[in-house]
Amino acid sequence: MKDVALASAYTSQLVLDNPLTLNGGISTHDSAGGAIVGYSTGSTPVRGVLNVTGQGTSLDWTAGHIYDVTVNLTNQSTMFVSTLTFTRNMSGSDIYVNNTCILGWFSGPVNVTGPSKNSNIYIANGGLFSISANQTWGMTSAANPAYFGVHNAGLLKSFGTATIVGNYDTTGTTRLDSGTLFIDGLAEQTSGMFELRGGSTIKVGGPDVALRIYDGVIAGQGTVDANLTLGYDGACPPPTTAIISPGVLVPPPNNRTIGTLTIVGGFQMFGGTMSIDVNKVGAIDQVVVQGTYAALAGSLFIQIDTNYMPTQHVVLPFLTAPSIVGDFGSRTFNDYRLPIPPTNPNPYGRNVHWGLLRSATSYSLRSIET
């Protein structure tokens, strides 16, 4: 089937009593209540299936409802959520964004109803969920347990300001290029990359107000408006290679810029690694904790550019918090030695190497003269 429009002053419905494959275009922009729905056997709803497939094939969801439907995007197809003034409703439905496919949320809210029927978005490896809407997709208010979820194994990319009222879990890449993404629910990463760019903000509400990086990397230049945990907690936690690394990834030969990650809540390291870079002019990555405390465990790794020629008694803070408790189990940095040339006030010339300096509220890299 191709080129279908649910667009009139009437309440039109596309009832999927059999799986339907679309290889043209379909649009729903009937503010009176046009819908794509499954079917019923008696009083029992049955999930309908809509397959959107092929390059140039798009489901344009400008208004109306999707009830009891599985939407499969395959083979370079797209689904666009747009038009600010109209309302969309979703219930008992799942959207699968498969490899080479795009779900683009450009404008307008999407209301998810429940709680007897869960709705989800699944982003497969190679799939893209692109968010630029300054709106809300999800329940009218946070619920526990949530009946809306976004499950990312591909790429979720966000611009501007948007809210997801539901749970978010990721094994892929989450990249905030600007603005604020508010997840009003659980937010968990078990592998992959969570990257903040351009001073963007990830805000988390939900039952524990925490971004949990069980494994994978959190990096960038931006703000975590929540508590942040690294690694697994519990009496017998599984091994983790979780990393917190301020700075944005850039192409070689630089590979990473110096950056600051600001944590509005508390910071808890159950394990993993804090990775800090110092560039050739002495700029250093920073983790700035504004709430309660930073509780340390795991390891510290500092990479110092060997072209950096420090002056005497340099102190470079890389972690600040109202209170620092615990400590790193291991601390590693390239402790190179280099000569300080004879200059005033050091007329004789000495060698310098590196050490660490800790106080109740900061952790720093410092130069040591010998």
Image (spheres, helix red, strand yellow):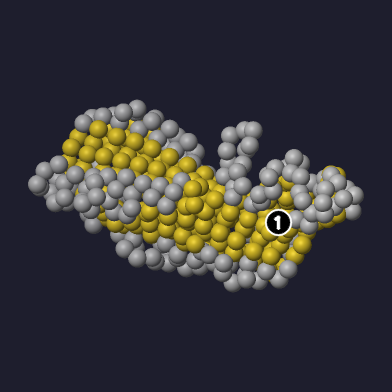
Q: Position of residue 171 (x, y in %)?
A: 54, 47
Q: How many marks?
A: 1
| Residue at image location 66% in from the left, 51% down from the top | 284
The amino acid type found where label 1 is placed reads Leu
The answer to whether residue 208 is left or right of residue 162 is right
| Residue at image location 38% in from the left, 65% down from the top | 142
| Location of residue 198 with respect to 229 vertically, above or below | above
The answer to whether residue 338 is left or right of residue 195 is right
| Residue at image location 73% in from the left, 50% down from the top | 302
- Name the outermost residue toward the left: 9
Q: Nearer the viewer, residue 352 or 143?
A: 352
Q: Position of residue 126 (x, y in %)?
A: 48, 36
Quarter of the picture containing the N terminus is top left
| Residue at image location 29% in from the left, 53% down from the top | 110
Q: Nearer the viewer, residue 160 or 189?
A: 160
Q: Position of residue 301 (x, y in %)?
A: 73, 51
Residue 282 appears in view: yes
Q: Circle 1: is it few (<14), some (14-19), or many (20+) Cα within 10 Å?
A: some
For residue 183, which quarter of the picture?
bottom left
| Location of residue 247 with respect to 113 vertically, above or below | above
Residue 96 appears in view: no
Question: Which residue is denoted by mark 1 in the rendering?
Answer: 316
Q: Position of residue 140 (x, y in %)?
A: 31, 63
SS of the residue under disc 1:
strand
| Location of residue 151 with respect to 289 vertically, above or below | above
